[in-house]
Amino acid sequence: MSFSLKNVISIKDFSKEDINFILKQAQHMEPVARSQEMSQGMVGKILGMMFYEPSTRTRLSFETSMKRLGGGVIGFAETGASSVTKGENLADTARMISKYADALVIRHNLEGAARYVSDIVDVPVINAGDGSGQHPTQTLLDIYTMKRIFGKIKGLNVALIGDLKYGRTVHSLSYALGMFGAKMSFVSPPELRMPQETLHDLKEEKAVTQETDDIHQVLDEVDVLYVTRIQKERFPDPEEYSKIKGAYLINADLLKGKDLIVMHPLPRLDEISTDVDNTSYDKYFDQAFNGVPVRMALLDALLKSF
Ligand code: NCD
């Protein structure tokens, strides 16, 4: 098994072998991620972080991953403290940081921003979320989490719930689930349905079993409820958001007697009630932890082969 990518921009760029390689390596990284073992794998290497949009888990788990492997991190968590506020453009900023760092992690509000940067710098580029586009490293940790719990992805029944239109996590995840032979239900308000382009991509695998706005239609048949936040910041009209917010509420009462797990990329707002936390359904905090071993495996694969 090996890893063939220089950049991590879209999950569509991955082969099954690439994904399986990262999942396998991530398992080996777990003791280091839990601080039970030490690693010097990235000593002398520096990761450059360019975060044009807010982030807690993605940025901090990348930083943790790099540091646990003995490497260093530079960059900005918000543009306010960088020369972006002076008007420096994305290309110059990326070119500059690529002179200091061995790889770049970028989160940007514009779809395509990470691909653009990967075309103009020489070091590997990792897309940590580009607008409503893709979030491939989230998908790797989502798939890792499901595989850890169920042993395989093929044949799993997964419901993706919430904002399927603007949510980049579900755009990436649905593609990977299709590739590995899972079946999916898409549950969203009619205004926030999965984009046609993604539906078209999944058609060949016959991966999508239903599209509905009614969560009750899926509760008895799914193994995984993958819940997402309504992406307020992507709505062109705040009034449209206020009509849709709070569309779904997953609480302990709704889940009672159901044989399933609940995942969420986080942050959650009001879509999962806190009475689900620490029940057998709650896998979202374990899922967030899994970002560390998975991103360690990814950094190792990218920086060793490059
Ligand atoms: C997600 C994102 O930024 O797309 N967060 C994350 O990386 N875990 C989900 C979200 O913001 O709703």
Image (cartoon, rainbow, N blue to C red):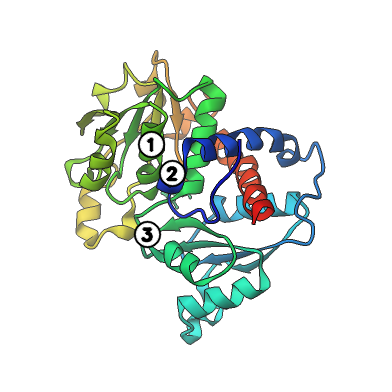
Are dots 3 and 2 in contact, CB under 8 Å?
no
CA distance for labels 3 and 2: 18 Å
Asked if residue 155 is positioned above or below residue 228 in the image, the reply reads above
Q: Tell me the amino acid under the disc marked 2.
A: Arg
**Quarter occupied by residue 81:** bottom right
Residue found farthest to the bottom: 86
Quadrant containing the N terminus is top right
Badge 1 or badge 3: first in the primary sequence: 3
Please give the label number shown on residue 227: 1
Residue highlighted by disc 2: 268
Q: Tell me the amino acid under the disc marked 3.
A: Gly
Residue drawn at x 38%, y 26% as measured from the top left: 181
Residue drawn at x 37%, y 50% as measured from the top left: 168
Image location (x, y in percent) of residue 294 = 60, 41
Q: Tell me the amino acid under the disc marked 1.
A: Val
In the visual, does 80 lie left or right of 293? left
Badge 2 or badge 1: first in the primary sequence: 1
Could you say which is closer to the camera, residue 286 or residue 195?
Answer: 195
Residue highlighted by disc 3: 131
Are dots 2 and 1 in contact, CB under 8 Å?
yes
In the visual, does 253 lie left or right of 149? left
